[in-house]
Amino acid sequence: MAVLGPGGVAVIVSQWLLISIAAAIIAARLWLRVRIQRRRLWASDIFMILAWLSSVATASFDIVFFRLGALEPHIDTFLRQYDGKMEDVVLMLKLFWVGSIPFYFTFYLCKAALLATFLQLFPRFMTYRRAALWCVVAFTATCFVVSIGYHTIGCLPVSRNWSIGKDACPVKFMGTSFRLAWSLHFVSDVLIFAMPWTILHEIQTKGSMKVGIYLTFLLGVVNLSFCIVRFTTIELADGDQSVPLSLIDLWSSLDCNITLVIACLPSLRPYLHSRKAIMEPSGDYHGKYASTTGKKSTTRGALTKHGFESLDEERGAGALSPTPTAGGLSVMRTTTIQVHREPSVSSDLAPGGTWGRDERDKSDIELVAVKTPAAREEV
């Protein structure tokens, strides 16, 4: 019995719903970073924007397929039930080939955004783990180059990709291209989502922060599930009746756009922190908050007039460094933050009311403390 696909409407609605969610998150991030904090964009922000634009380009191809009738529930991946003109078939084959390029770009730009965030998150003194992270960066970049390279030059001349008949690329090439691209995408995803777990158990974070991290990576597990379903749906298809094109398109769009949403979610952290900072009561109303290390007390920063915290890490988490002790052991400072109702802007703003030059480069990722083996021995 032939399997019917969801149809073009379901595909397009699901695509643009997720794209709209990602757009809202990115807009909130840009408003915070540029308008409120008046800081420069981080590499992760730029990758997010490029990934969103690439996702919009990918979704735009599906609108063309829908108008040509290729996303009808009964149309399979080989267009054998398509009753349109031969010129339309050639056009769709050409669009399939071209549309795969922004599809790959969306995946790997999302990975780049997450990896750029991880480079802020991993402290510099974790040399081995940062080295492992850079290995994942190199592997992911290689996966992107191989996927794009095999897709574009694996069957030459390029016009064979949308030719019909004996001049067309062999079916074996298309199968190999799909399996290769999927395998590299899946393995790199697993490595990327596994990296933060190597340090989360050693970083002391507040409960709300941990919940947000766990929910983000739970969504990552869901996305990996969609990725596996997409692969098995294509591989286990019956030879006589291929999988509906709209079904494959739906799984692919969910895989692509959920990855986009996941890549954007970490940028919402400053909003959650600022909300808690404004609502949290305090016994001191001097407009400042302090951090304590044992018996020492230092001024750590201040809140802006909009209620967002200005952190002291000049280059993200890498600015966090061990504090040597008299006994030769190295332990991390344990920071306790007290937030007050009346924020001060004096330490964050220049005399003219604008952010200082250095403030614009500061990270909004904060690590409270790391439980190193030496610290456990001290305790």
Image (spheres, rainbow, N blue to C red):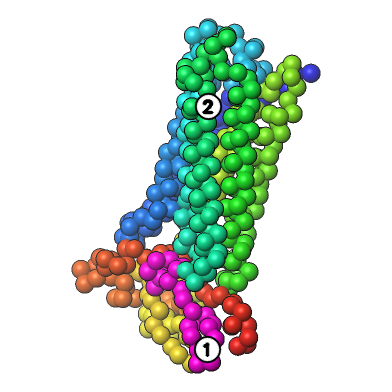
Disc 2 designates what residue? 154
- Quarter of the image where the C terminus is located: bottom right
Label 1: how many Cα within 10 Å (few below 14, some 14–19, many 20+):
few
Determine the image quadrant of residue 223. Answer: top right
Sequence order check, earlier mark of 1 and 2: 2
Q: Residue at x 54, y 53 (%)?
A: 136
Q: Where is residue 42 in the image (x, y as percent from the top left)?
A: 39, 56
Q: Where is residue 282 in the image (x, y as percent from the top left)?
A: 48, 81
**Does residue 317 appear in the picture of this structure?**
yes
Q: Position of residue 359 (x, y in %)?
A: 32, 67
Residue 366 against residue 327 in the figure, above or below: above
Q: Left or right: 285 with respect to 185? A: left
Determine the image quadrant of residue 40. Answer: bottom left
Q: Residue at x 45, y 41 (%)?
A: 52
Label 2: how many Cα within 10 Å (few below 14, some 14–19, many 20+):
some
In the image, residue 313 lies in the stretch drawn in magenta: yes
Q: Left or right: 224 with respect to 331? A: right
Residue 8 against residue 149 in the figure, above or below: above
Q: Residue at x 52, y 80 (%)?
A: 332
Instruction: Tell me whether the residue at label 1 lies in contact with that at label 2, contact meaning CB atoms closer than 8 angstroms.
Output: no
Disc 1 designates what residue? 328
In the image, residue 66 lies in the stretch drawn in magenta: no
Q: Left or right: 7 with respect to 277? A: right
User: What is the span of residues highlighted in magenta in the rendered image?
Assistant: 308-335
